[in-house]
Image (tube, helix red, strand yellow):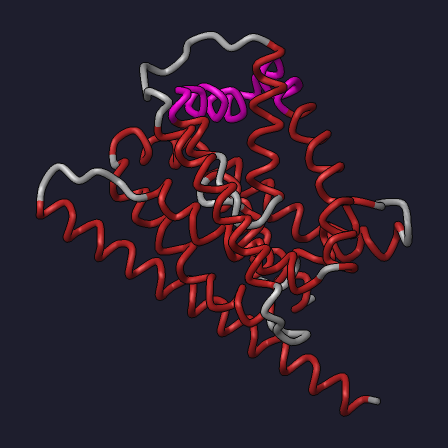
Amino acid sequence: MKENITKFIKGLIIGVASLTAGAGTLAIVLGIYDRCMEIISNPFKNFKENLKYIWPIVLGIVISAACCANAVAFLLENYHAYTMCAFLGIIIGGIPTLIATANKKGFKKKYLLSMIVALIITIIVTAIASNTKEGKIVEYIGIPELIIYGAIYAWGAVMPGMTTMHILIFMGVLAPILEGFTSLDFRIIIPFGIGYIVIALTTAGMITYLFKRFYGMTYYAIIGFSITSLVMFIPKFSSITEALIGILIGVVFLIAMYTITRIDKKIEETKDKSGEIEE
C-alpha cells in the first residue's frame, strides 16, 4: 500500500510536469523512468507484473493532468513570467540527480561528447522556437496539425530534457489543446492522442535500447538537453520588481524539487537496506 501511494504521488507530480516542464526529466529524478519506458516499449511482456507496477503512476498522471490543465493554461496566459520561473526552478532542481544517475555506472570522458551534441541540437531547436512569432491563440486546428502537435508534445514529454511545450506556446495552440482535453472534445483528443501515442511508443523502445547499450552516453545527452532547454524558459520581465519576484519563485521551486529528490532517494535507500536484511 505504501509503495502504491508513493507511486501515485509520483504520478501526480509527473502529470503536472507533462503540462509544464516535461515529464521525462522528472520521471528520471523520481526513479521511475527506466522501468516505465521498458513497460511502454513492451507492455505485454510480464503483463500482470507491469500492470501492478504502473497503474498507480498512470492514475496519478491522469488525475493531476485533468485537474491542473486549466490552471496551467490560466497561469501561462496571465502570469507568464512567473510560471516560466517556476519551470526553471523545477528543471534546475532536478539536474544534480540527473548527474548522479548518469555517473551511477562510472564516468568516461567520451560521455561529454554526447552532451555537446545534445547541446547543439537543443540550441538549434531553441533558435527555431525563438524565431517563431508568438501570435494570437489559434481558434481552429485541423486534424493533420493536431497529429503533428501530439507528436511534438510526446517527444518533449518522453525524451528527458527536451522541452517542446514552449514551441506549442509560440504557435498559439497549447491553450486550445488544453481546453479541448478539459472539455472532453474528442475532435481534439483523438488526433492529438494518435500523434502522442505513436511517438511515445517508438521513442520508448529507442530509449530503452540506448540505456541498455550506452547508459552513460545516453544520460549525458539528457543532461545536455536539460541544460540548454533552460534557455527556452527564461522569461522577459517587464520590471525589476517582477524580475525579483520571478527569481524568488524560481528559487522556491528549485528547493522544493531538490528536496523531493532527496526524500525519494532516502526512501529508495531504506527499501534497499530492508531488502538486504530480509535476504
- In the picture, the quarter occupied by the C terminus is bottom right
Inspect the magenta stretch and tell me whether residue 28 lies in it. no
Relative depth, front residue between 136 and 125? 125
What residue do we see at 46% from left, 62% from top? 95
Give above or below for 219 relative to 195. Answer: below
Name which quarter of the figure residue 252 lies in.
Answer: bottom left
At which x and y percent is residue 65? 53, 39
Q: Position of residue 75 (x, y in %)?
A: 31, 36
Query: Is 36 placed left or right of 260 in the picture?
Result: right
245 relative position to 233: left or right: left
Q: Residue at x 65, y 76 (%)?
A: 106
Q: Would residue 242 be visible to someone looking at this image?
A: yes
203 over 6 or under it: above or below: above
**Magenta: predominant secondary structure element?**
helix
Position of the N terminus, as image quadrant, is: bottom right
Residue 120 percent location from the top left of the image: 48, 44
**Front-most of 172 and 206?**
206
Closer to us: 171 or 197: 171
Whether residue 26 appears in this view of the structure is no
- Residue 274 position within the rendered picture, expressed as x and y whole percent measured from the top left: 72, 86
Residue bounds of the magenta highlight: 170-192
Residue occupying the point 44% across, 29% down: 167
Residue at the bottom extreme? 277
Q: Nearest the camera: 247 or 118?
A: 118
